[in-house]
Amino acid sequence: MRETSDGDPVRSRRARIGRLASTGRRLGYGSLGVAVVAFLVGAATTFTPAVVAVVVAAMAVGSVVLLPAIIVGYGVRAAEREDRQRGLR
């Protein structure tokens, strides 16, 4: 396990998990954005089966990825805040 510059493996793991959560949030919000754009394209033209499939798939991916990423991100920030309050940082 790689350690941070201060030698704490817990903080390095927390930082890695935080980066993963951030990537998950970007992917989730991006997928929801794709769904909205595809929906607007379908509303402006016609809802072909391909447009409907893109909207449904993007909504599903966004929902599945975004929820855990948000929860994990809150957990990482709460742990960092608790470390600061205890004077461990």
Image (cartoon, rainbow, N blue to C red):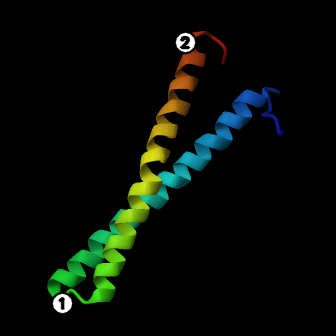
The relative height of residue 79 versus residue 76 in the rendered view (above or below) is above
Query: Hey, what amino acid is under mark 1?
Result: Thr
Residue at (55, 17) in percent of width and height:
82
Query: Hey, what amino acid is under mark 2?
Result: Gln
Residue at (25, 90) in percent of width and height:
48
Marker disc for residue 46? 1
Mark 1 or 2, which is nearer the eye? Answer: 1
Q: Nearer the viewer, residue 53 or 35?
A: 53
Residue position marked by numbered label 2 in the rendering: 85
Extreme-top residue of the structure: 86
Residue at (33, 72) in percent of width and height:
56
Question: Toward which corner of the image does residue 29 lie, by quadrant?
Answer: bottom left
**Tag 1 secondary structure:** loop
- Badge 2, how many Cα within 10 Å: few under 14, some, many 20+? few
Marker disc for residue 16? none
**Tag 2 secondary structure:** helix
Q: Nearer the viewer, residue 52 or 39?
A: 52
Q: Is 6 left, or right, of 23 in this rendering?
A: right
Q: Is 5 left, or right, of 86 in this rendering?
A: right
Q: Is 51 left, or right, of 13 in this rendering?
A: left
- Badge 1, how many Cα within 10 Å: few under 14, some, many 20+? few
Q: Residue 36: in sight, yes or no?
A: yes
Where is the N terminus found, in terms of image quarters?
top right
The alpha-carbon separation of the residues under discs 1 and 2 comes to 55 Å
Q: Which percent across, then down, holds residue 50?
A: 33, 87
